[in-house]
Amino acid sequence: MRIFLFSLLVLCHPHLYAQIDGETAETKVWREFTRQVEAAGVEILNSYPQPEALDRAEGLRYLLQQLGSSLQQQLIEQPGQIPLLRVGATTINKWGLDGADAKYQVATISSSGSYRLYGQLGSARLFAMQLTRMSGTFAAYGALTGDQLKADKAGNFEVLIAPHKPDDWSGVWLELNSGTDNVLIREYFGDWANERPGRYYLEQLNTTAADTPITTTQMATLLQDTATTFSSRAPQWQGRVEQSRKYLENKVHVKKSGEQGLAANAYGSGWFNVARGEALIVEMEAPDALLWSVQLGNVWWESIDYINHTASYNDSQAVVSGDGKYRFVLSHSDPGVPNWLDPAGHTEGALLFRMQKTKGIVNPRLELIPIDKLAQHLPEDTIAVSSEQRQHEISIRRQHAAIRWAP
């Protein structure tokens, strides 16, 4: 309310832009913005569960990233901005337990707009585009996967995104729901050594240029909206974290995707709590799915670094045991066996299983044991993995990251 009254005063009396009480109007706007951000950040840090020093330090980084994302979101939505696809979570800007196998591209759009999305599919295992609402409470609407794009042999495709399908349009059409404010593209990679991302472009078909110079009043609104977005976005996953810690410690609950996810997907949520000197064995059969994976996350519901650590595996990366089952070992030191889930120093955090386009679900089984008893709980034919082999795994991850997120 204070910033609204101040903005109204400035609007009615432009000469006050120069100075008020020894400060410029812009200085006062900035002070109010930083005050709101400070209060929201302190509240989050004081209320979020943070078991160890590592979690507390990551909290500061998390707030910084969420502030940056909130500001970028507001800047992108300013009048005159064209809709551009921008790369989402990489090694930074993680949020909502971003997928270790995924490249995200997102563009802000208007629910009254009309858009042409076109390009060339890459060789990712799964391509999916979805209309979403990012502001306020997240919501997902219409979606298309790569096999629905009617791409030619070279992978070229074109999709019309609009509230209504024109009578003369015979191509692929995705209905633009009235709640939509973003289009999200996901590419999921299985074979990180060989699969490559595609090229995608977005063009608005009904747009007019807006070149009116900005004013201090407009900037006051933008900063207010940024602070509001930050205050709601940063703590959005706190409830999920608290529920997982309370009910899913060293357990996993698997269910089919609801309305918010992609069709025919299943997700398994869990929470690991593994002390140094312990190991958590995760055993499962492979689901009948296009792609499946397991990964680790921290208490801020961000993915744990899966580029410099083996903090994730998909069905192409994981090694199957002689009995046809997959066994993952979560421990703080390298156990020298396949499928080491490296928590990168975290004693607690999220476990997430994705089963993409699956015909059914599987339920992983978890067992916490002393790490010096590990050999007794693994099949006799379990192969050994040397430190050199582990470093080779990491090198493939790093090479793929350079390709996945290249401009």
Image: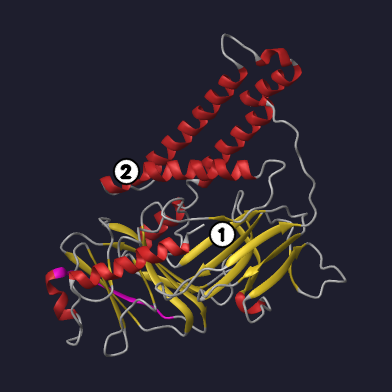
Q: Quadrant of the N terminus?
A: top right
Q: Residue furthest top?
A: 22
Q: Is residue 376 left or right of residue 227?
A: left
Q: SS class of the residue under badge 2?
A: helix
Residue 202 drawn in magenta = no
Residue 64 is tagged as: none
Residue 309 image point, x, y percent? 30, 62
Q: Earlier in the sequence, mark 1 or mark 2?
A: 2
Give the label on residue 105, or none: 1
Which residue is nearer to you in this view: 210 or 22? Answer: 210
Q: Taking 155 as reference, is 369 left or right?
A: left
* Above or below: residue 175 compared with residue 154: above
Q: Foreground: 385 or 360?
A: 385
Left/right of residue 360 with respect to residue 332 in the rendered view: right
In the figure, is residue 48 to the left or right of 369? right
Q: Which residue range is magenta in the image?
A: 362-371
Q: Say the numbered circle drawn on residue 57.
A: 2
Q: Where is residue 43? Give x, y as percent.
A: 43, 37
Residue 270 visible? The answer is no
How would you rate the neighbour count of disc 1 (Cα within 10 Å): few for under 14, some for 14-19, many for 20 or more?
some
**Colour option used:** secondary structure
- The part of the image, by quadrant, that contains residue 166 is bottom right
Three-letter code for the amino acid on which mark 2 is drawn: Ala
3D distance between C-alphas at marks 1 and 2: 28 Å
